[in-house]
Image: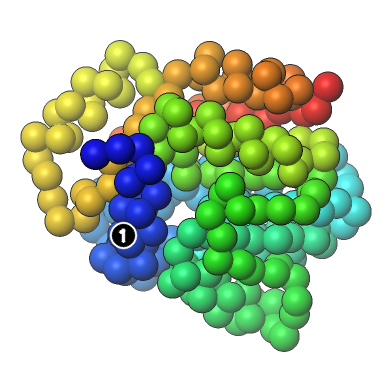
Amino acid sequence: MDVTDDKIIVKNYFNSTGFDRWKRIYGDGNINKVQLDIRNGHQQTIDEVLDWLKEDGNLTQISVCDAGCGVGSLSIPLATAGAKVHASDISEKMVEEGKARALYTLGNNDNPTFAVQELEAISGSYHTVICLDVLIHYSQEKMEKMISHLCSVAQTRIILSFAPKTFFLTILKKIGSLFPGPSKTTRAYMHKEIDMIDVLKKNGFTLQRNSMIRTRFYFSRLLEATKD
């Protein structure tokens, strides 16, 4: 199966069984222990990014593109804090849920704006571009193209998270693959941090900060890079 099929698989998954599963994880209802662990890990990533952006003290003055926004877990807090946010996701169901949550939290507001878009279709220009917990669904080749495009619409800064390719996590992934379940319908790709940094450098961005978010079942490396 060719790498272009990953996009179709991801889109179909998050418009069907994946949407129901991740809506629960990103929500506040009752879920199992593994899902709760993943929810906590994802929230730690969101909180870390919010802390980084708030440190600058200029959220009310910048535009942010939340690429792969899911149900708005980052977009809504950013808009609440005063940033101008464009939120996009490949899944129509995720976007509709994000709109509903934004309406509930912020009322009748045009910020954030939501759009059903593939990463490569994002256009415009934004002070900061953020892409969290998305690249795990795409191969090395696809990942490089996606990051390069996101760099092209970022004026000043790009923030990415990805599943780091380490010996321990590679073994853990192999063990997990022995126990397939109905929710495991997308491929999970891990990426080497050095490869991610290299793609950023090729597009004129220099690493500024990094962080590792780790729970029992959630592993995510967070990178912040700014334009040279």
Few, some or many C-alpha atoms within 10 Å of disc 1 (few <14, some 14-19, many ≥20)? some
41 or 181: nearer the viewer: 181
Going by the numbered disc 1, the residue's amino acid type is Tyr
214 left or right of 151 in image: left
Where residue 161 appears, as percent x and y from the top left, is 53, 36
Coloring scheme of the render? rainbow
Where residue 107 appears, as percent x and y from the top left, is 70, 83
124 left or right of 188 in image: right
Where residue 92 appears, as percent x and y from the top left, is 47, 70
Which part of the image, by quadrant, shows the C terminus? top right
Residue at the farthest left position: 178
Which part of the image, by quadrant, shows the N terminus? top left
Residue 213 at least partly seen: no
144 or 188: nearer the viewer: 144
Q: Is residue 2 above or below residue 74?
A: above
Residue on which disc 1 sits: 13
Residue occupying image coordinates x 44% and y 72%: 93
215 left or right of 129 in image: left
Element type at mark 1: helix
Q: Is residue 58 above or below residue 151?
A: below
Residue 196 at least partly seen: yes
Where residue 143 appears, as percent x and y from the top left, is 49, 33
Residue occupying image coordinates x 9% and y 34%: 178
Question: What is the tally of numbered marks visible in this picture?
Answer: 1
Q: Is residue 221 above or below residue 1?
A: above
Residue occupying image coordinates x 64% and y 61%: 87
145 or 208: nearer the viewer: 145
Res 189 quadrant in image: top left
Residue occupying image coordinates x 73% and y 60%: 85
Res 8 quadrant in image: bottom left
